Amino acid sequence: MRTLGLGKALVDRVEEHTLPVSLTFLTGDEAFIARRVDPLPSGFLDRETMNFRFSNHSWVLRVDGRTVLVDPCTGNGRTGRGPYFDGLDVPYLERLAAAGVSPESVDVVFSTHLHHDHCGWNTCWEEGSWVPTFPNAEYIFAEEEYRRWDPAGPPHANSFNPNVFDECVRPVTEAGLARVVPLPYEISPSLTVEPAPGHTLGHSVLALNSAGVRAYFTGDAFHHPVQLTRPELHLPGCDDLETAVATRRALVQRALNEGAFLFPAHFSAPHYGQLALDGDEVRFVPGGAVRATAG
Ligand SMILES: [Zn+2]
């Protein structure tokens, strides 16, 4: 994907890998699928298998003189992450370099939440231990999300995601690179982390407001465009489903009101888009013109 210009921000996507997920986990409503999914690009549904292509990627933003890495995927050589995620050997850092970003040049690392596929490249394996991949970065963690996963805190019923805190968060904290912040939190004049709880207790989104262009980097608030039309649809694994649905409704309303772009963590190509109304039903409009302004 080419570099996108959003106001004065430049946005790149760095892919780790993709995997098939059955749309039937979300909905089996054939009339709804025919109306809202069939017109979308093919990655959102393979009619033969009823799978959609779940893209595992990060977003890189360059704005306000800072380079910000959003949701650094799962990482290579992990175990206990489940099928499709264990033992990856992917040239992720090379792809980051192809976007013009070296590990040393990342100023901020931000995870919308601390599931394994959103904080993996926080660290890499070096001489027998997990060490921070981005030595000059400030790693920003929403306080509630950090506490949610800290093994020193109270246990949570939703216990998948083993070892992620110890492998991907603790080494960063021990290196003095973690900044655990209450929300909302302003990263720079154009970028604010805002609470968007439900998928996990402390899930958040990154809001961009630059030269009149608005965008939300929404992590796992949405996994597939059907959830933009029907926010009650969900994949398994939420911490708090009722709150997740309310968060989706609120984000959809804001995106409609503001004409904002949405950049989810797992949408297939073109990976981002805007919303429109078809009667009173919300419709996903994939991609869209963004100004390619250097900034
Ligand atoms: Zn995810």
Image (tube, rainbow, N blue to C red):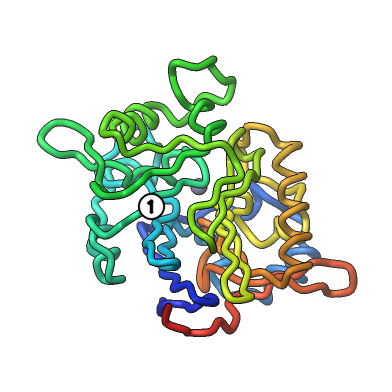
Quarter of the image where the N terminus is located: bottom left
Which image quadrant: the C terminus? bottom left
Count of numbered circles on the image: 1
> As displayed, is residue 46 above or below residue 169?
below
Residue 219 % position (x, y) = 55, 52
Q: Is 6 on the left-hand or right-hand side of 72?
A: right
Disc 1 target residue: 108
SS at circle 1: strand
> Tag 1: residue type?
Val
Q: Nearer the viewer, residue 150 or 245?
A: 150
166 w.r.t. 9: above or below: above
Quarter of the figure with residue 154: top right
The answer to whether residue 49 of the structure is visible from this angle is no
Report x, y in % for residue 281.
84, 67
The residue drawn where x is 42% and y is 82% is: 294
Residue nearest the observer in this picture, 271 or 186? 186
Mark 1 crowdedness (10 Å alpha carbons): few <14, some 14-19, many ≥20: many
Residue visible at 18% across and 31% down? 129
